[in-house]
Amino acid sequence: MQQVVLVAGVDYEFAGVDFRVFTTNRRRFLERRNTAREDLRFVTMDVRTGETEIRDVTFPGGRRTEAVSVTRSHDPVTRASYAAPAGGHPRFRPGQWRVLGVDDVYATVRQIGAAAPGTLAELSFFSHGWMGGPILVNSFDDRSWSFTFPVVGSGTPVTVDLVVPSTARDPDDRDARPRLDFVAPQMDAAGLGLFRAAFAPDAVAWLWGCAFPRVLHRALTAIERAPGFRDSGTDPETVLTLTSPLEADDRAWLVSNLGAALDPSSTATRIVVRFKHLTHLMCRANGAGYAQALADAGNVHVHAAPLGTYAEYDTGGDRLMNVHAGFAAHLRFYRNYLGLASDAEKRRYSVYAPGRTCPPP
């Protein structure tokens, strides 16, 4: 039986988006495509409600049957789960360890790898997102956590502040972290082996949310506007001058990352550099994100919004999500210069293959 794991994050702005609806729409989409009437298991993990639903769709004697079971093993997420924003987004309060998190998703995948290897056809995260991966609740990795020891009898509770070890996950953090999630102590070699074993040879993973660091968006736009740049076929040795729409922070990021590759004619208001160094920088930036980390850990092709783009909700059709059409130039850059193919469903997501590298120019 093929299996699909669908994860619904929380709209932490509470602006009316229910990501569980998207998991339902995805299940229905995949069922419509199942013209061979193969048996399917859909595992839906809803962070907001704390529910995990297992839905088996089978065809005994050619007739469709459906069996559904629901487990409520995690705490729900409500407005009270968040601290009031101070000029930013609502912040998930610490100490909510019983809320469904990305580590629970990984555990589900490993269970499939142990019990039914090679059957996971799709892993989908429907949530807000950033280059660091799905934002399931908008928690933070501040490398510290507080633990209050319970009182036995009379006395005053004792709270101890602890520093999180370098490769351990912050216990207060429920979101994805590409630098930590696929290494010990989260996943040792055996755990990573089970995680990878779960995926079918032709499996896919989807990160449906955004990946929109503005510095990357503006840097790409400056490249695309630079004299001498073409959508395809730009000579790697071409010297480009980047100006608009770069801001001071963008130029500082480029200077910091390009270093000695910068042309001496660069100034405080313009970046002058050979094109090959820009493509290498964009390759490294995308390689540092969650999409590539998941692709490498699972040995699976990951469909994700490439850095500098964001996703939007479909207004018709399948009622899923897509990368905004206004990023067509960015997508051409990624396809023609970094080899990031577009997804076969024509939703404008890029495909991150396992083992991608960025050879120095």
Image (cartoon, rainbow, N blue to C red):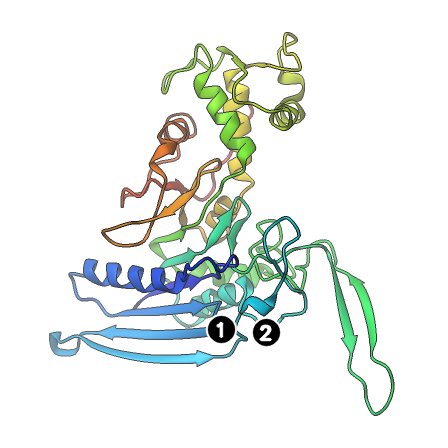
Residue 306, picture quadrant: top left
State the CA–CA distance, disc 2 to disc 1. 9 Å
Give neighbour class at mark 1: few <14, some 14-19, many 20+ (Cα, 10 Å). Answer: some
- Residue 358 visible: no
For residue 98, which numbered disc appears in the image?
2
Residue at screen point 60% across, 60% down: 188
34 shown above or below 254: below
The first of marks 2 and 1 along the sequence is 1
At 47% from the left edge and 24% from the top edge, which residue is drawn?
Answer: 221
Give how far across and how far down residue 350 sits, in percent: 38, 40
Image point (36%, 19%), residue name: 232
Secondary element under disc 2, as helix, strand or loop, is: loop
Tell me if 312 is positioned left or right of 192 in this view.
left
Verify CB contact (< 8 Å) between mark 2 and mark 1: yes
Quick one: 294 or 268, which is closer to the camera?
A: 268
From the viewer's perspective, is 175 left or right of 126?
A: right
Quadrant assignment, res 227: top left
Q: Which residue is mark 1?
A: 50
Type of amino acid under label 1: Gly
Q: Residue at x 63, y 70 (%)?
A: 96
